Image (tube, grey):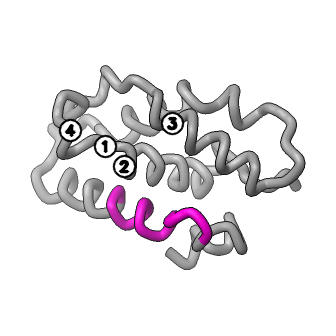
Amino acid sequence: MEELRKKVGEYCSNDGAGFYFFVVEEMVNRFLEFGSNGINPFSILKDEVYDGVGNTAKRRFTDGYERMLAVMEQVVNVRIVKFYQSYSKYWLDDKVKKGVCHFLVIDDRLRWVRT
């Protein structure tokens, strides 16, 4: 969580990002617990989420908070089909999708604030 706070700064607590982050972190831990036969399902999920929100994140915004809000609004509309748990509303709800966006920030694939 500390790494996430460093990346997103003051915006981390304003949208429930900590909660979304921990929801996804728990999901990742379950992948590790049950094994994935050499396939990294979380990478597949991150790729699908990025494909759905990347263009939104690249648009011009007045500040990083506005960018984050726009990405969060977009990600709930992203249709996930390659991720093997995409059929389950219990595994892949809007909170998970939002949490994945914060993991993409950690991976430097998304940025809320331009540097």
Q: CA distance from mark 2 to mark 1?
A: 5 Å
Residue 94 lies in the magenta-colored region? no
Q: CA distance from mark 4 to mark 1?
A: 6 Å
Residue 53 pos. (x, y %): 59, 32
Q: Which residue matches tag 3?
A: 75
According to the picture, the residue beneath numbered tag 1 turns out to be 93
Say few, some or many: other residues with alpha carbon within 10 Å of mark 1 (under 14 / 14 to 19 / 20 or more). few
Q: Earlier in the sequence, mark 3 or mark 1?
A: 3
Which amino acid lies under the numbered mark 2 shown in the image of this protein? Val
Q: Secondary structure at mark 3?
A: helix
The answer to which of marks 2 and 4 sits earlier in the sequence is 4
Which residue matches tag 2?
96
Question: 10 Å neighbourhood of mark 4: few (<14), some, or many (≥20)?
Answer: few
Going 69% across and 31% down the picture, which residue do you hit? 56
Spatial distance from mark 2 to mark 4, Cα to Cα?
10 Å
Assess whether mark 1 and mark 2 are in contact (beta carbons under 8 angstroms).
Answer: yes
Q: Amino acid at mark 4?
A: Lys
Q: Circle 4 is placed at which residue position?
A: 89
Q: Secondary structure at mark 4?
A: loop
Q: Amino acid at mark 1?
A: Asp
105 to 22, vertically: above or below: above
| For the residues bearing labels 2 and 3, Cβ distance under 8 angstroms | no
- State the image coordinates of residue 68 (x, y, percent, origin top left): 67, 50
Q: Which residues are magenta?
A: 14-24
